[in-house]
Amino acid sequence: MSVLLTGFGPFAEHGSNPSEALVTAPALLAMPDVNSLVLPTCFNRAPDLLIQRIEETLPQAILMFGLAATSTNLRLERFARNRNTSASADNDGVMGTSLGASVPMGPATYVSSLPLLAMSRIASQKGASVAFSDDAGGFVCNHTFYRIAHYLAERYPRTRCGFVHIPTPMPREPQLEAWVDVIIAWIKLLQP
């Protein structure tokens, strides 16, 4: 079973994005059937680039990661919402409030199709602080999560996908290694 990991590059005052460091960690890239993609923090470009990679690799599971600057935990996002509420500009200068819905006439929400309870148990057993979240925000993370969930529902309904927010600041090496261990265990969970 192939798994696609995504993170985002730097944006705004965040000169580095820990989600990029996470999904490009050598231990993850060395795993068979695991692909990685770093997306630009841009409303209009990130989902389209991810859809292109989905079509190229046809993964059975997609684990998306992004930065939650105010979080202290790995946040397992339960829902993608069809709205863009951020007044902050992305790297292309686009504000979410100018976009309205992520998909006009789309459903209000999509539910993560990842095994979140099992993922939470694994993370806790490995010593990571983890929490569930019902709101992936109003910025590019939620927008991308929603657009991809919608795309998969229409084209590849058996492909599992979900989103995890990781905290800032940039993790030191031991913390990054611990998170990589969690991600490896999650990938194994998704690859029966």
Image (spheres, rainbow, N blue to C red):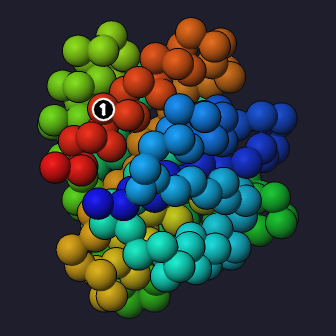
* 23 with respect to 185 (left or right): right
- Number of marks: 1
Relative vertical location of residue 1 with respect to residue 192 in this rendering, above or below: below
* 42 with respect to 24 (left or right): right
* 74 with respect to 114 (left or right): right
Q: Amino acid at mark 1?
A: Ala
Q: Residue at x 27, y 40 (%)?
A: 188
Q: Considering the numbered disc 1 on the image, is that residue within a helix, a strand or a loop?
A: helix
Position of residue 174 measured from the top left corner of the image (x, y, whole percent): 56, 9
Q: Residue at x 15, y 37 (%)?
A: 117
> Residue 189 appears in which quarter of the rendering?
top left
Q: Residue at x 53, y 79 (%)?
A: 56
Position of residue 141 measured from the top left corner of the image (x, y, whole percent): 54, 55
Relative vertical location of residue 41 with respect to residue 92 in this rendering, above or below: above
Relative vertical location of residue 54 with respect to residue 128 in this rendering, above or below: below
Confirm whether residue 22 shows in the render. yes
> Residue 139 appears in which quarter of the rendering?
bottom right
Q: Residue at x 63, y 18 (%)?
A: 171
Position of residue 83 measured from the top left corner of the image (x, y, whole percent): 47, 68
Q: Tell me the quarter of the image containing the N terminus.
A: bottom left
* Residue nearest the viewer, comparing 182 with 165: 182
Relative vertical location of residue 52 with respect to residue 162 in this rendering, above or below: below
Query: Residue at label 1?
Result: 185
> Residue 24 appears in which quarter of the rendering?
top right
Confirm whether residue 19 shows in the render. no
